[in-house]
Image (spheres, rainbow, N blue to C red):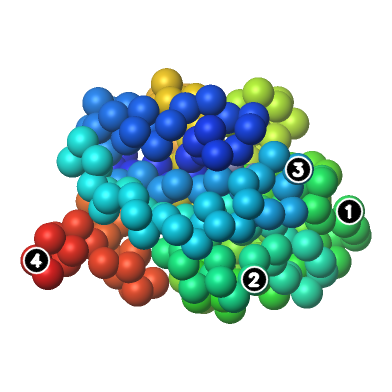
Amino acid sequence: MKFVADMHTHTIACTHAYSTITENAKAASERGLSYIALTDHSVKMPDSPHEWHFCNMRVIPDFLYGVRIIKGIEANLIDYEGRLDINEYIYGNVEFIVASMHGDCMPYGTEEQITSAYLGVLDNPKVFVLGHTDSPDFPFDVEAVTKACKEKNVAIEFNVSRFRSNRSIQRLKHLILPTCAKNGCSIIVDSDAHFHDKVGAFEQAEALLNEISFPEELVLNADLKRFEDFISSKGLKTNSGLTAE
Ligand SMILES: [Zn+2]
Ligand SMILES: [Zn+2]
């Protein structure tokens, strides 16, 4: 697989991450990526930047080291209806949302409640990805959510940072990824990097995908055309679309 994008990265704007946008972009360029998304935590997380951070991202260039910088956010699901912790100003100023559940922001719940939250957020047009759905703390109906993701053109994330948790990786390997494959639901492999050396470091994920014979055509960021078709379908300009302006 030739990965072209890393759509979940953190910077020093979150206090528990340690690299700058520039360092992440340089690392992405060295890995041969064409796109990265900046996805620092939205405002309900204890380490998040002030909302102004997300409202002023237009000052960041579209390209650094030849890598497209997509101005995004990792927004928190906060209830069982699938609402996010972003107001209209943040929403209007970000290009891209990874929607995630974190214990600090989302109440724990039954499988039915967590499923309802995921299904509820899929209609948000800026939500491209459901982040790290592998957490055993937030069980959901994987069959129903992967089917709905396919229908609503939202990807399930294979979050590489979860290799630190064997339980998460086992859930991915034996439940989430096989169900995505069965239902034709696309995935995106993301680093969730908190330091620039992890940006685009997808070797472990690729090995696991190969091990379970995961269909490559469902890995959105493993092919430039496939990835660009996806972001265009969600209303984002591709690199060539942007430079042609
Ligand atoms: Zn997260
Ligand atoms: Zn993250």
Instruction: Provide the residue designation for mark 3.
Output: 46
- Label 4 or label 3, whichever lies nearer to me, is 3
- State the residue at coordinates (90%, 60%): 110
Circle nearer the viewer, 2 or 4:
2
Q: Amino acid at mark 4?
A: Ala
Secondary element at tag 3: loop
Amino acid type of disc 2? Asn
Label 2 or label 1, whichever lies nearer to me, is: 2
- Residue contact at pointers 2 and 1, CB within 8 angstroms: no
Label 3 sits on what residue type? Pro
Is residue 118 found left or right of 67 in the rendered image? right
Q: Is residue 139 left or right of residue 50?
A: right
Q: Is residue 43 above or below residue 26?
A: below
Cα–Cα gap, marks 3 and 1 = 18 Å
Question: Secondary structure beneath disc 4?
Answer: loop
CB atoms at circles 4 and 3 under 8 Å apart? no
Q: Position of residue 51 (x, y in %)?
A: 61, 58
Earlier along the polypeptide chain: callout 4 or callout 1?
1
Q: Is residue 43 visible?
A: yes
Distance between the alpha carbons at the discs numbered 2 and 3: 17 Å
Tag 1: amino acid:
Tyr
Could you tell me which residue is drawn at 27 percent across and 50 percent down? Answer: 61
Q: Earlier in the sequence, mark 3 or mark 1?
A: 3
* Quarter of the rendering containing residue 236: bottom left
**Residue under the image location 56 percent in, 71 percent down:** 89
Q: Does the CB distance between marks 4 and 1 fall below 8 Å?
A: no
Label 2 CA crowd tier, 10 Å (few <14, some 14–19, many 20+): few
Query: For the residues marked 2 and 4, what is the alpha-carbon distance in whole angstroms?
Result: 32 Å
> What residue would you read off at disc 4?
244
Label ID, residue 87: 2
Task: Label 2: state its secondary structure.
Answer: loop
Q: Quadrant of residue 165?
A: top right
